[in-house]
Image: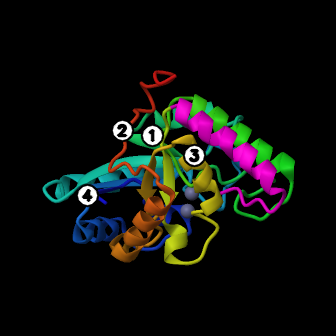
Amino acid sequence: MIANYHTHTTRCGHAIGTDRKYVESAIIAGYKILGFSDHVPVPFDGGYRSPIRMGTDEIAGYFDSLTQLKAEYKKDIHILIGFEMEYYPDYFEKTLSLLSDYPADYLILGQHYLDNEIGSHRTTHPTDRGDYLEKYVDQCIQGLDTGVFTYFAHPDTLNFTGDKAFYEAQMRRLCEHALKAKVPLELNLTGLRTPYIYPHEPFFRIATEVGNPVILGFDAHEPDALTRTDVVRAATRLAKKHGLTVLDRAELVNPFTARTERT
Ligand SMILES: [Zn+2]
Ligand SMILES: [Zn+2]
């Protein structure tokens, strides 16, 4: 593994460790590329403050800190600055325009809630509701179609406990669409550190059949996560078992110039 594009910071409120510590851990682990993709700030109506992301007033500090580290460690590692972002129909354009004042290198799609987040279903919470699964797939497809995303983080995050055939059909639709949109899927390493809902093997059986390329992503919420070579080995074994094609690095999509270029 030479690149990790999925790294958080304490600004999201559920990560630990200084920005510098993440960089130092990545250097110790021998990566060539470290991409930060903290949970994007969303300018919600009515001043709603999301429990999982930085505030809009923290963007400048995020860029200042990471830009400084990027320069300081440039001989050792290539640092990228991006965001993990949902497709929320009411806020997508507003969020993008908020970010356009800053030199973000890339965005990854990660759908943590349905609809527009406020009062909506959290995608990691178990549900047997077919309409939730269908909505998840529809919403992610709309996100993929915007053409701004470099990859698709934890595409298997919707924690569905209902009918297996329905899950299979919906996730096949999602995988086929991601392939068509040329957006690689992330094989998220979280569940290989401690038991978690992803990576979800039934999902990756479908992705293998569809032929989606995958990229390993640590989804690091603590600096030490980046040094777990055992987790990388487990992910490589899992990919091999399913016959998945693993990409070493992502082809970065500039979110501000690449709209619809890939479709
Ligand atoms: Zn997080
Ligand atoms: Zn995520």
Q: Which kind of residue does numbered mark 4 sit on?
A: Leu
Task: Point out the tag, 2 or 3, that comes first from the N-terminus.
Answer: 3
Which quadrant of the picture is home to ligand 2? bottom right
- Secondary structure beneath label 3: helix
Whether ligand 1 has any atom under 8 Å from the Cβ at mark 4 is answered as no
Q: Position of residue 134 (x, y in %)?
A: 79, 43
Q: Position of residue 81 (x, y in %)?
A: 37, 48
- Secondary structure beneath label 2: loop
C-beta proximity under 8 Å, tags 2 and 4: no
In the image, 79 versus 240, the foreground residue is 240
Q: Which mark is residue 69?
A: 4
Residue position marked by numbered label 1 in the rendering: 150
Q: CA distance from mark 4 to mark 1?
A: 23 Å
Q: The magenta stretch spans which residues?
A: 156-181
Q: Which kind of residue does numbered mark 2 sit on?
A: Glu
| Residue at image location 43% in from the left, 67% down from the top | 237
Q: Which kind of residue does numbered mark 3 sit on?
A: Glu
Residue position marked by numbered label 2 in the rendering: 251
Task: Point out the tag, 1 or 3, that comes first from the N-terminus.
Answer: 1
